[in-house]
Image: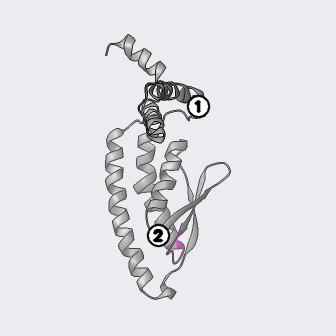
Amino acid sequence: MNSKSSNIFIRLFPQPLTSALLFAVWLLLNNTVHPSHIVLAAFLAVAIPHLTARFSPPKPHIKQPLTILILGIIVLIDIVKSNIIVARLILGREANIRPRFVSIPLDITDNYAKVALAAIITLTPGTISADFSGDGTQLLVHAFNVTDDRDEAALIAEIKARYELPLKEIFQ
């Protein structure tokens, strides 16, 4: 595709995956490939993304794509480790479990990075992202097992080093 035809395609289909999905779903829901439904599906596939474009957030600007792969591997390893730790705690004595809310100070400012951090924390067993502060500089996390202030400081340091720093490299 040359540059001119590529620009026309992008203007016609600003969200090509959404358009393709709308087209297919319309035909599947109507259980027909009658020409009139194909025309209507094509119209909807073009019109709806244009009508909803203003509701779509701007696309993130990714600075270090390789870091995404490395962070993904780290998160997968941490999920497996956390599953084992949480399983041991649950199967052990209840008195050994000490939940606590921990406030994580954030250095990241990009909204996509903040949401990714909250998602990573929630995906990792034993922690759940609870809330952002009003100004977005703190993330409140519920941790399954934080025994004292030293554990809290270690949890904060681990989250900042393992997740926030790579997200900062990726998005900022």
Residue 96 visible somewhere in the drawing: yes
Circle 2: element type: loop
Question: In the image, residue 65 lies at what x, y percent?
Answer: 35, 39
The residue located at (38%, 17%) in the rendering is 6
Mark 2 or 1, closer to the camera? 1
Quadrant of the frame with the N terminus: top left
Q: Left or right: 69 with respect to 55? A: left
Q: Measure how far apart labels 2 and 1 are at the Cα level.
A: 38 Å
Numbered circle sitting on residue 62:
none
Closer to us: 107 or 133: 133
Taking the magenta stretch, the answer to whether it contains residue 148 is yes
> In screen coordinates, is 101 left or right of 76?
right
- Sequence-wise first label, 2 or 1: 1
Disc number placed over residue 52 in the picture, else none: 1
The residue that disc 2 covers is: 126
Residue 172 in sight in this render = no
Query: Which image quarter: residue 7?
Result: top left
Mark 1 belongs to which amino acid? Thr
- Of residues 148 and 40, the one drawn nearer to the viewer in this rendering: 40
Tell me the crowding category of disc 2: few under 14, some 14 to 19, or many 20 or more residues within 10 angstroms, Cα based: many
Q: Nearer the viewer, residue 150 or 38?
A: 38
Identify the residue at image location x=52%, y=28%. Answer: 44
User: Which residue is the extreme one toward the top?
Assistant: 4
Specify the principal SS of the magenta part: loop
Q: Are marks 2 and 1 in contact (CB under 8 Å)?
A: no
Sort mark 1 into few (<14), some (14-19) or many (20+) by Cα contacts within 10 Å: few
Amino acid, disc 2: Gly
Q: Secondary structure at mark 1?
A: helix
Residue 106, x across and y down, in percent = 55, 52
**Looking at the image, residue 41 lies above or below residue 69:** above
Write down the region rendered in magenta: 143-149
